Amino acid sequence: MNETNQKNSFFHLDPELVLEATESAGFSPTGEFTQLNSYENRVFDIRLESEGNIAPVSRIIAKFYRPGRWSKEAILQEHQFLHNLNVEGLKTAAPLLQKNGSTLSQIQEMPVAFFPKIQGRMPQELSLPDLEHIGRKLAIIHNVGAQLSFEHRPVLGEIPHDPWSNLQFLLPWIAPEMRFRYEKAAETLLDLLQQNIDPDSFQPVHGDCHRGNILHNGNSGTASEFFFVDFDDSMRAPVVQDIWMLFSSVYILDEQAAILKGYESLRSFPYEQLEWIPLLRGLRILNYAAWIARRWQDPSFPRLFPQFKEYNYWAEEVEALEKIVWSFIKK
C-alpha cells in the first residue's frame, strides 16, 4: 500500500477493518464498538463475546497508531514501560498479548494494539491530598523508567522534530503581522533552553502528564486510587516534565509542595529542574502549534482547530511566548 492510500485508510478507518484487526489478534468482537476521542491515533472501545477470546476480558480498547509516527521498536518500548509499571504494582492499561505472541500487530501497515478497558473518570478537581497521592505514583513511574534505555523513544527537544525545525516549518503558517515577533520570541526561548536545561538529566518519563491523562476509580477512603493513561508520548526528558502540567493557574506553590511531598516519600526530586518549568511551557506552546501544522492534511484537524489560521490565534501565541521569555530573562 502506498503512503497516500495508507494515510487515507487511517483517516477514514473502515468499521470492517477495525473488526478484522480485532479478530486477527485473537479476540471475538460482538460487532458493537464506539470510536473514542483521540487526536493522534484512532481508538475504539470494543465489546467482546463471552467466549473465544485470547484474554479474559469483556471490553477492550483498540489503538490504531498513526502510520509513520513511531517505529515498531518505539511502540514496543512504550508497551514494555506499561508492563513494568504493572509489575511494580502501579495500575495502568498495559497492552494485551495478541495471537501472534506480541502486544503489537499490523493491518494494512497500520500498527495495532489492544488494551483492557479500565473504568475510571477524570477528576474535576484535585485536592492537595490527591496531588500528594499522585506525586507518589509519579515517583514510581520515574523509578521504573530509570531502569529502561528508551533508545527508540523520542527525546525532548531532539526527535521526532527538534524545536528549531518546528519553528522553521511553522513560520509560513503564522499570521504575517505576528511572524517577526513570534520568530524572535521563539528563537530566544530555544536559546534559553539550550543554555539552561541539562540533557544529562533526562530519563524515561510519561511525557504528556496533564490532568486529562489521570483517571480516578471513583472510590473513596482506602480504596481510592488514581491511575495514569496514554503513555503514547513517553520519552526521555527531565522528570519535572511530568509535574508542571498538573498545576492549575492558582495555588501553584501549594500544589507543587503537595506533589513533591508525595514524590519525595519514594524518590529524591532534583529541585533545580523547577527553574526550567517556564521554558518547558514555552517549548510546549511552540511544539503544539507545529504539531497542528504538520497534521493539517488529516481531515479532522481543520475541524478541530478552525482558528489556527486566524490572526487572533497567533496574537495570543506571541503574547504567551513573549511573556515567558522576558519574565525568565528578568528574574
Image: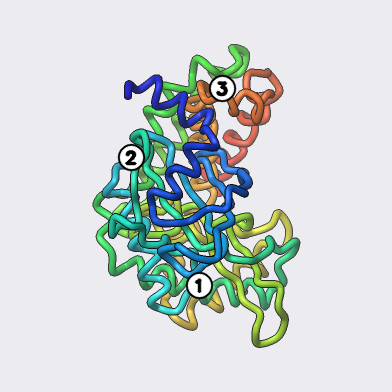
Front residue of 98/319: it is: 98
Dot 2 corresponds to which residue?
Answer: 159
Callout 3: helix, strand or loop? helix
Q: How has the structure been colored for display?
A: rainbow
* Residue occupying the point 49% across, 59% down: 242
* Residue occupying the point 67% across, 18% down: 310
- Of labels 1 and 2, earlier in sequence is 1
Q: In the image, what residue type sits under mark 2? A: Ile
Q: In the rendering, at what x and y percent does residue 161 appear?
A: 36, 34
**Mark 2 and mark 3: Cα distance apart in space:** 26 Å
Callout 2: helix, strand or loop? loop
**Mark 1 and mark 2: Cα distance apart in space:** 29 Å
Above or below, comparing residue 25 to residue 20 in the picture = below
Q: In the image, what residue type sits under mark 1? A: Lys
Dot 3 corresponds to which residue?
Answer: 181
- Of labels 2 and 3, earlier in sequence is 2
Dot 1 corresponds to which residue?
Answer: 91
For marks 3 and 1, give the one nearer the viewer: 1
Front residue of 2/205: it is: 2
